Amino acid sequence: EVDADGNGTIDFPEFLTMMAKKMKESDSEEEIREAFRVFDKDGNGFISAAELRH
């Protein structure tokens, strides 16, 4: 489960944990931050379930 604290959203540290399992050594921090921004559509620093579905 990505939402470690069970609050219904994914914050950046939770996103990093998920991405660490999937990323290659060549992925930069900026690439990971950009991936987070793609999902964080409203820019509030969290990814909601609704944002993940879109």
Image: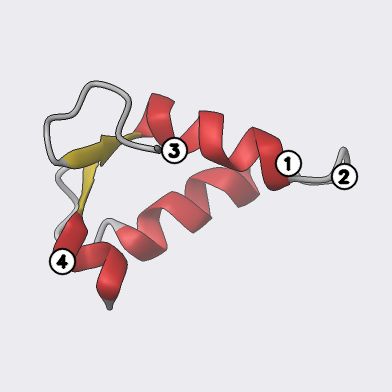
Q: Label 4 to label 3, Cα distance in Å?
A: 15 Å
Q: Position of residue 6 (x, y in %)?
A: 18, 28
User: In this rendering, is residue 53 above or below 18?
Assistant: below
Tell me the element at label 4.
helix
What residue type is disc 2 on? Ser
Pick the front one: 16 or 7? 7
Which circle's residue, 4 or 3, is located before the other in the chain? 3
User: In this rendering, is residue 8 above or below 34?
Assistant: above
Mark number displayed over residue 49 = none
Nearer the observer, disc 1 or disc 3?
Answer: 3
Could you tell me which quadrant the N terminus lies in?
top left
Mark number displayed over residue 26 = 2
Give the residue displayed 28% in from the left and 78% down from the top.
Answer: 54
Which circle's residue, 2 or 3, is located before the other in the chain? 3
Left or right, 3 with reference to 20: left
Tell me, yes or no, whether the two marked residues, 1 and 2, touch with CB atoms within 8 Å: yes
Mark number displayed over residue 50 = 4
Tell me, yes or no, whether the two marked residues, 1 and 3, touch with CB atoms within 8 Å: no
Q: Label 1 to label 3, Cα distance in Å?
A: 14 Å
